[in-house]
Image: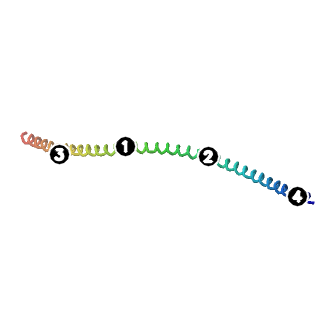
């Protein structure tokens, strides 16, 4: 009986070891499945990151172009402002000259009137 008891104990241990081995294999399979899912998720994240980096580069390029355009527009606005001041100055000068011409015209008209009056008197 001792031999049978020993065999029963060994068989029980063997059965438990077999069950534990099966559970370990199942756990290992589950871990491998999880690792594959993690790798897949990581690949998706990397692809998304690459897309974001490409989009960021596009946005930076557009921002650089906007900056250049703003710089050019600012320069043109400055030129227009300077041109405006120059035009105002020329208009002021022109206005003064026109006033002088009007003054001279009135003076000349007065002289012409005097000459005509003198000529009428001498006739």
Say the numbered circle drawn on residue 6: 4
Q: Nearer the viewer, mark 4 or mark 1?
A: 4
Task: Quadrant for the N terminus, please.
Answer: bottom right
Query: Could you tell me residue 30's position as x and y percent?
Result: 74, 52
Q: Nearer the viewer, mark 4 or mark 2?
A: 4
* Few, some or many residues within 10 Å of mark 1 (<14, 14–19, 20+): few
* Few, some or many residues within 10 Å of mark 2 (<14, 14–19, 20+): few
* Tag 2–tag 3 contact (CB < 8 Å): no
First in sequence, mark 3 or 4: give its number.
Answer: 4
Looking at the rendered structure, the secondary structure element under dot 1 is helix
Instruction: Please name the residue that numbered disc 3 is placed on.
Output: 103
Marks 4 and 1, Cα distance to the nearest angstrom? 100 Å
* Tag 3–tag 4 contact (CB < 8 Å): no
First in sequence, mark 1 or 3: give its number.
Answer: 1
Say the numbered circle drawn on residue 75: 1
Q: Is residue 91 left or right of residue 36?
A: left
* Few, some or many residues within 10 Å of mark 4 (<14, 14–19, 20+): few
First in sequence, mark 4 or 2: give its number.
Answer: 4
Looking at the rendered structure, the secondary structure element under dot 3 is helix
Marks 4 and 2, Cα distance to the nearest angstrom? 58 Å
Instruction: Please name the residue that numbered disc 2 is placed on.
Output: 46
Marks 2 and 3, Cα distance to the nearest angstrom? 84 Å
């Amino acid at each position: 009986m001792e031999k049978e008891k020993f065999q029963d104990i060994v068989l029980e241990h063997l059965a438990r070891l077999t069950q534990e081995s099966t559970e370990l294999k199942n756990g290992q399979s589950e871990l491998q499945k999880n690792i594959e899912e993690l790798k897949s998720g990581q690949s998706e994240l990397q692809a998304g990151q690459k897309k974001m980096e490409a989009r960021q580069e596009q946005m930076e390029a557009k921002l650089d172009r906007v900056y250049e355009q703003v710089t050019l527009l600012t320069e043109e606005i400055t030129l227009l402002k300077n041109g405006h001041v120059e035009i105002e100055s020329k208009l002021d000068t022109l206005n003064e000259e026109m006033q002088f011409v009007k003054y001279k015209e009135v003076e000349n008209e007065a002289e012409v009137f005097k000459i005509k009056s003198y000529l009428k008197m001498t006739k």
